[in-house]
Image (tube, rainbow, N blue to C red):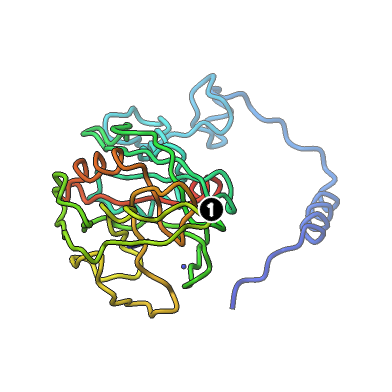
Amino acid sequence: MSVHKGAPALLSAGTLCAALLLSGCANTAPPAPVAPAGTAAAAAAGDSRPAGAPPGAARGAGGPGEPAGSIASAPVPAPRLPGVGPATQALVPDGTTQAFVVTGATADDNTSTATLYEKGPGGHWTESAGPWPTHNALRGWTADHTAGDLRSPIGVFRLGDAGGRLPDPGSRLPYDQDDEFAISGTGFSGEPLEGSFDHVIAIDYNRVPGRTPLDKERPLGDEKGGGVWIHVDHGGPTQACVALDREPLRELIRALDPAKEPVIVMGPAPELAR
């Protein structure tokens, strides 16, 4: 697959309370009466609030287009992908307008759901394809993937290269057709693996972007795993990849647009919601 963390002393509560009590005890004279706002006595005392102004009312310049003394509106948070929290959304590049979100129910689930979203001119994300059922790694998910742990890496990774044993189904990503994508054997449930790599999309986890998915260079080192793809679902959990049924995968390959800087956002729902 492809991409993805001296001090001033504080006054204790007890000390603060004691200080307040002492200051109160030191002044036993009754407080002076407060003149009503807007009266001559109030003006003489330096109270410039207009008559009827509530205590603490602010008198300020206000922002552009706001009357003096108004309270500025709180900034509106940027729209986020459905089910994605602020920490995860912050990992999505600013230029990305296409995101493939793969969500598992828990950290140990090997089944998940995938939906393709597109970001419109107003900044809001809308569903453009899916949702589709998917498989992920046998043991679920991890934020610290290592080779052979049988977990899919959690994170936000770019999608920039595709390939497969079969001809290009209409990809706008670079597509490498190669017989080396052939695979045989059986999966964890005894299901045949043949045809699983007929079409694949490389996830930019521990790989060099811009190369065929078959490329073996691992920038983070071999111990961090690699070769994490979106590939054809063989009917069971994977080593670390995301597996999607054949026709939805072909649809996804045709939909991904490099001009939209597509990414995959993948992991268990509680993690992605952070």
**Vertical relation: 50 (above or below) 27:** above
Q: Quadrant of the N terminus?
A: bottom left
In the displayed structure, 213 sits above or below 191; it is below
Relative placement, left or right, of 60 versus 7 is left
Instruction: Pick whichever, 90 or 174, lies toward us.
Output: 174
Q: Position of residue 241 (x, y in %)?
A: 41, 57
Q: Quadrant of residue 114?
A: top left
Residue at screen point 83% across, 53% down: 26
Q: Quadrant of residue 180?
A: bottom left
Q: Residue furthest top?
A: 52
The answer to whether 162 is drawn above or below residue 50 in the figure is below
Residue under numbered circle 1: 189
Residue at the location (31% across, 53% down)?
195
The image shows a total of numbered marks equal to 1
- Which residue is drawn at the image coordinates 57% and 36% (left, top)? 45
> 125 or 109, which lies in front?
109
As shown in the figure, which amino acid type bears the numbered disc 1? Ser
Q: How dense is the environment of label 1, judged by Cα within 10 Å: few (below 14), some, or many (20 and up)?
A: few
Query: Residue 186: percent from the left, percent from the top?
Result: 45, 58
Query: Relative to residue 116, is residue 237 drawn left or right?
Result: right
Q: Is residue 144 left or right of residue 172?
A: right
Q: Secondary structure at mark 1?
A: loop
Q: Could you say where residue 4 lies in the image, as x and y percent from the top left?
A: 37, 61
Q: Position of residue 157 (x, y in %)?
A: 34, 58
